[in-house]
Amino acid sequence: MSEIKISIFDEFFCIADKCSYSCCRDWNKIGLLDDEMKIYLEEPYIAKGIDVTEKKFKFKEDNRCTFLNNSGLCKLVLKYGGDILCHTCSTYPRIIRMNHGVKEFTLGNGCPKVLDMLAKADVPLPFLLEGEGFTEEYLNSIDTVIRDIIIDILQCRDFPLWKRIYFIYSFVNALINKIEDEQLAVMGEYNSYDYIARLTKNYDTIEIDFETIIKKLHYFFNYVNNSEENKKRMPYIKYIDKYCNKEINFDMKKIELKLTELNEYMADYENMLENICVNIVFRGITSSKQEVILNTVIAMIMTLTMSLYTLFLIKYDEKIIEENDMYNIFSYYSRIIENNTINYKESLDRIMENGIFSKGDFFILCKGLDILS
């Protein structure tokens, strides 16, 4: 069998209680398989922490797993050993799945340790192929080809990241409602360095002032964070709760100063931003359904813009950004946007209902990436 994996996959190890944002919290649920349920329900200590109807571990009001102790360690592992863990808990953030006859290995961005590894990757994130090579089904599937084109664009560092991302958003929109032959023509056009250079050059002619960008970012910030499930997480993630659903009278001179400070800080994490995007695309596009592809790209845009905007709020509030806080914020948005699809869909639905989900708005969000990073 052929396998393809993100290059840092085998280097990952869980840092347990040293983690700044445990993966044992802030999910919709940690689901259990039937055979796991059978084993767990035979142990009274474990059974009391199981939601039998939903087949999942119970979570406390603060959105922590009932078996996560105050030191950040799993009570089950301490009592029974590591073999007691369910499949999800023993594998996450490792994500392994079959895609057109090829086994794919990647890591979830909802883990601070993964983000630290992505930040330290100096070159465009490689993928390692092991085994007999790709299957014909894998090579010829539309979704795999589209995904490869998007990753190639993301890793083309001749252009600023925000331009690469908006170009990808335009590419995916150009594919919508096209039959296969038309899609192939679009793919051929957008998979051209000259076309990327020509189209992205035009982005510079569209002028948008800081105030408009900040207001639009804050508008999206409120929509993404304004769900009952997300509100449970906020107290743990600094500054999100403080600013969500509040009108802010921004001082534009101060904005420019704090954006400069944020730019200087994020200069050391430029590779991480690109690699987060690559990781989202690699694990998200596993179907040729246009909705899946578009939602993956939207998730990429919103994960970056909301994380960076939250970091901007920290700067605006005259606070120092600690590296752990930065990783926690990116992990937070990865969890609610990439993984908690119900809450993410709720946010998208609210945006759609209010008629603000347009290509122009996404240009502003991507332009926001430019001024934020």
Image (tube, rainbow, N blue to C red):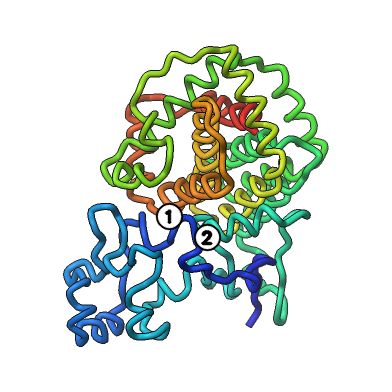
- Who's the residue at 45% across and 25% down the image? 218
Disc on the earlier residue, 1 or 2: 2
Asked whether, in this view, residue 208 is left or right of residue 219, the answer is right
Q: Is residue 109 above or below residue 205?
A: below
Is residue 288 in view? yes
**Picture coordinates of residue 41 (x, y %)?**
20, 82
Question: Mark 1, residues whose alpha carbon is within 10 Å: few (<14), some, or many (≥20)?
Answer: some
Q: Which mark is residue 223?
A: none
Q: Is residue 326 above or below residue 11?
A: above
Question: Mark 2, residues whose alpha carbon is within 10 Å: few (<14), some, or many (≥20)?
Answer: many
- Quadrant for residue 367, please give it: top right
- Who's the residue at 49% across and 52% down the image? 289
Asked whether, in this view, residue 13 is left or right of residue 71, the answer is right
Q: Amino acid at mark 2?
A: Gly
Q: Amino acid at mark 1?
A: Asn
Out of 286 and 80, give the one closest to the viewer.
80
Q: Which mark is residue 108?
A: 2
Marks 1 and 2, how far apart at CA: 9 Å
Out of 174 and 235, give the one closest to the viewer.
235
Q: Quadrant of the N terminus?
A: bottom right
Q: Quadrant of the C terminus?
A: top right
Q: Secondary structure at mark 1?
A: helix
**Picture coordinates of residue 94 (x, y %)?**
53, 69
Circles 1 and 2 in contact, beta carbons < 8 Å: yes
Is residue 177 in view? no
**Picture coordinates of residue 155 (x, y %)?**
73, 49
Q: Which residue is mark 1?
A: 339
